[in-house]
Amino acid sequence: MSGLREKILTTASALFQTQGINSTGVDTIVSVAGTTKMTLYKYFGSKEVLILEVLKQGHQDFQSWLNDKLSTNTKKPGEKIQKLFDYIEEWVTSPDFQGVGFIKASAEFPKEENPVHQLSSEQSLQFKQYISHLAAEANIQDADGLALQLSLLFEGAVQAEQMKRGSGAMKYAKTAAKILIDGALTH
């Protein structure tokens, strides 16, 4: 990936997180990135394509970080599902946390036929499937049901933290997740 393309992507990501996607114009992105509209459109074609790339990169970065944490610090499948919310809490409470792209983007692009909304919905589903996979590896019988419960806790707590940092929502979501996971592991 070219250095300038990466700079535009990083700049857009930071601006979208802090100012909102719809509130951030192409002029602002190119000004902060120190480039031109022509260069932005050369690499991305349109603002929508740039938004989709930002969402893809953010989701991939989070999934890679979470996979690394779980793979490095846990060996047994049951431990992975139990540690999931410990690492999510670590991520959400870090000073760098600015929200979850697919949650923010779905709010800014509420029409289901919009490509940004569709990608956001797909990423939410991918995360739920990731949790379901962890649950299935831990021999949890209703892995999909548990995954839905945990993804609802995750999305709700993240939304609360996006609205008010330090709300404590993630701490309580983690406690609820532990109850659900422990109950599922004993059945």
Image (cartoon, rainbow, N blue to C red):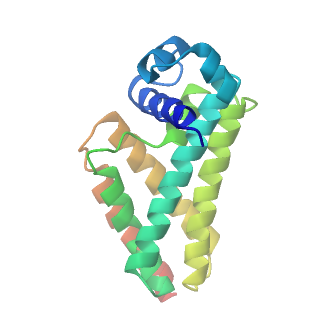
Q: Using residue 74 as the reference point, say whether residue 103 is left or right of it.
A: right
Of all residues, the one furthest to the right in this rendering is 113
x then y, percent, for residue 153: 45, 56
Res 23 seen here: no
| Residue at 72% in and 33% down | 115
Foreground residue, 115 or 164?
115
Q: Is residue 27 above or below residue 110?
A: above
x then y, percent, for residue 97: 34, 44
| Residue at 68% in and 24% down | 42
| Residue at 67% in and 28% down | 44
Res 59 seen here: yes
| Residue at 38% in and 28% down | 18
Foreground residue, 5 or 47?
5
Position of the N terminus, as image quadrant, is top right
Q: Using residue 124 as the reference point, say whether residue 31 is left or right of it.
A: left
Q: Using residue 132 as the reference point, say whether residue 178 is left or right of it.
A: left
